[in-house]
Image (cartoon, helix red, strand yellow):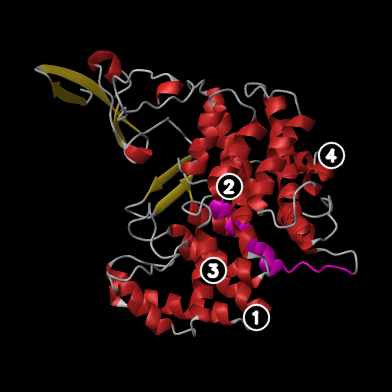
Amino acid sequence: MSEIAKLELNGKTYEFPVTEGTEKEKAIDISKLRDLTGYITMDQGYKNTGSCYSNITFLDGELGILKYRGYTIEELAEKSNFLEVSYLLIFGKLPSKTELEKFENGIRKYSLVHEEMKNIIDGFPKTAHPMGVLASLTSALTAFNPKSVNANNESEMFEAVCKTMSKFLVIATWTYRKNKGYPLNYYDNTKNYVENFMQLMFSLPTGPYKIDPVVVSALDKLFILHADHEQNCSTSTVRIVGSSHAGLFASISAGVSALWGPLHGGANQAVLEMLEEIKDNGGDVAKYILKAKDKDDPFRLMGFGHRVYKNFDPRAKIIKKAADDVLDTLGIDDPILEIAKQLEKAALEDDYFKSRNLYPNVDFYSGIIYRALGIPTDMFTVMFAIGRLPGWIAQWKEMRLNKEPIGRPRQIYTGNVGLQYVDINQR
């Protein structure tokens, strides 16, 4: 017999079905609550509200589990690569060798960005934040690709995916080049996706650019770890914008804007700003450890603990090694990175942090890697967006295929009542 949840209200009893996912998660289906009772639920921030059924990503914050399409993040990070994981997320299965080659070639086919896009980026001041530029450029892609995508048409959807994956990478790196005053680079079809990121970002016309395989491997893992994370703020934004039947580029542009916020994608930027603060105040890590332990001190360690993961962030364990490899390979002498190492050591060994599960999270290590590569702090969230892109596409596609209704949350009104209009001459 199926589980039933009962609600007693004003002397009446209402029954609501309990639904269960494949990983044994349970939810009370209140879809008909308002129709039956006239009431709504109040759940600020939607922390207890399921907005959709999805077969893309499973996350268990209590146990520290993250899976894409049933595969653990640990196995994917060890054995797969970013484009293969992107294919898995978007198309629902790991690709065969032929399918992966077709995907890679499709991305190469659409890698050129319309030259008139340069006119748009030239309109931004050099001081414009890269995320603001990226959101605008992503939305502008709609003007150069005006055809509406039919998610039910496999060939149309495949073409749209390839266009989005290739062009987004190019314009994301252009935001950096614009800021630095460098000439804009183009996708190189002889290189793979992550190698292209490196040359798009850093290659200069004044000399050859050598791509370090250790760095490529670390970035590949970082992009995999960021590729999707269930119904977070930006992903939910992509789905709710797409539910109005807004196009793929417009929906992803909205996701970029949501990711921009410091409470979401800006977390790794906050880590580096914290490290800069410690350095500027003498670099006394022990002092800041004591400040973090003092409940009356407003200082908080950024990059430790996680809003969703109550034990440990499974992504952090994977990327810690990649961060160590990058630092060892590049041999960088940077006081900021030395402070980061001291903080990491304290958090992993100090009983105060261990007892509260305040372990370094993926944002802590990603910030360290980006810093080591010479990526400026305001580009960190752009890096996040590049990794999250396949997840956004997959979620948009799933929402359209499932024919989900337009998103329309309710509210409880708390404003004035019964006011009478007063003529402007009498106010």
Inter-mark Cα distance, 3 to 2: 21 Å
Q: Range of the magenta residues? A: 207-226
Element on which disc 2 rests: helix
Q: Height in image: 345 above or below 388? A: below
- Tag shown at residue 388: 2
Inter-mark Cα distance, 1 to 2: 28 Å
- For the point 33% across and 79% down, the residue is 290
- Tag shown at residue 114: 4
Q: Height in image: 8 above or below 181? A: above
- Left or right, residue 257 beside residue 163: left
Q: For the view shown, which residue lies furthest in the right direction?
A: 206
Q: Which residue is mark 3?
A: 272
* Residue 211 colored in magenta in the image: yes
Q: Position of residue 343 (x, y in %)?
A: 44, 77
Eye-nearest disc, 3 or 2? 3
Residues at badges 3 and 2 in contact (C-beta under 8 Å)? no
Q: Which residue is mark 1?
A: 332
Inter-mark Cα distance, 1 to 4: 38 Å
Q: Which mark sits nearer the N-terminus, 2 or 4?
A: 4
